Amino acid sequence: MTSTSTLALDNQLCFSLYRAQRLMTRTYQDLLKELELTYPQYLTMLVLWETQGSVTMKELAARLELDSGTLTPLVKRLVAMGLVSKERDIADERRTILLLTDAGAALRSQAEKVPAQIYTLCNSEGLDLHTVKGELDALSQHLSKR
Amino acid sequence: MTSTSTLALDNQLCFSLYRAQRLMTRTYQDLLKELELTYPQYLTMLVLWETQGSVTMKELAARLELDSGTLTPLVKRLVAMGLVSKERDIADERRTILLLTDAGAALRSQAEKVPAQIYTLCNSEGLDLHTVKGELDALSQHLSKR
DNA sequence: AGTTATTTGATTGTACACAATTTAGTTGTA
DNA sequence: TACAACTAAATTGTGTACAATCAAATAACT
């Protein structure tokens, strides 16, 4: 029997979201083990792969909606792994430009397999993942304009 | 124009989930500031409020699907705040029992206001939050049985 | 030019998450 | 009753998140 209290954990959308997100990250973790990337590192690589291998920290932060406190150390690890290099923008020395190394570019072909694998793992009878994605995006849109 | 690449960030359900979860946590953060609780601390208090103020660490971990590495320090903070007390189970000294203090129990009346406030902030034209919750639960169910 | 304001990224400090290991306590069994 | 197997928490170590602050560079203004 489910509690009808408005405070019951099972009645909170937030908890469903929180749990689903953690399960999703764990699912990625297994697949990303082969690439030796964490899940946020993978997201960062996605951005680099879709920007011809060159972005500023500011652009990356805007794309992932993460701040420098998160990204600076994360990128430092990608640099240490040899997937990314960092240099200052000559035109504006405040800016740091991230560049894909050859190893970083090469990793893409391995990463190409991940989306299909994830789809297989997530897809389930009676659940339209595309619809869920749209709803989550709508929720994010709504929450972010405040 | 959206990229049609399967690797494009915008095509990943995972990123929608990841972003929505972070936005939701931030939304809670504002409301919980008054209670001086973080979002995971709030979830922990929800569990205590719905269990007559008494749970073991193991039960709490099972309920929140978090492990002791996360919960031990989190609970330590709740104890330091005077909301929870800890004692050993006399029947089985391996077990730690968490108990609501009077202050912890009293906080519930303030927390009662949160769900309605969150609902107001999340609810949006053309988006059924109850449906979204159900879909996320279905996804979690699917991801956790593997 | 010199001062002020703004921008960019890095740094600091707090709080999760979670894998892996350790410690202490309990149970099952020869 | 030894003692191996198991269980519950705590601990350790790595990697995010994010608020707040800082330093350096640039822009804007007088």
Image (cartoon, coloured by chain):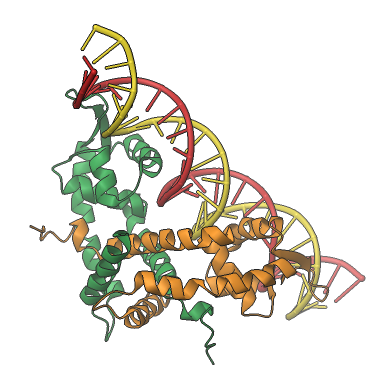
Chain colours: A orange, B green, C red, D yellow
Looking at the rendering, in which quadrant would you find the C terminus of chain A?
Answer: bottom left
Q: Quadrant of residue A67?
A: bottom right
Q: Quadrant of residue A14?
A: bottom left
Please tell me which residue is depicted at 26% across the width and 39% down the height of the picture.
B58
Q: Is residue A133 visible?
A: yes
Nearer the observer, B60 or B8: B8
Please tell me which residue is depicted at 54% across the width and 92% down the height of the picture.
B1
Residue A36, position in %: x, y? 58, 58
In the image, is A53 to the left or to the right of C14?
Answer: right
Q: Is residue A96 visible?
A: no
Q: Is residue B102 above or below residue A51?
A: above
Q: Quadrant of residue B131?
A: bottom left
In the image, is A72 to the left or to the right of B36?
Answer: right
Residue D7, position in %: x, y? 26, 34
Q: Is residue B25 above or below residue A132?
A: above
How many marks can you see?
Answer: 0
Nearer the observer, A54 or A36: A36
Residue C17, position in %: x, y? 41, 51
Q: Is residue B79 above or below residue D16?
A: above
Nearer the observer, B6 or D4: D4
Nearer the observer, A108 or A83: A108
Residue A144, position in %: x, y? 42, 75
In the image, is A87 to the left or to the right of C1?
Answer: left
Looking at the rendering, in which quadrant would you find the N terminus of chain A?
Answer: bottom left
Please tell me which residue is depicted at 63% across the width and 76% down the height of the picture.
A49
Please tell me which residue is depicted at 79% across the width and 72% down the height of the picture.
A89
Query: Which residue occupies the extreme bottom position in the image?
Result: B1
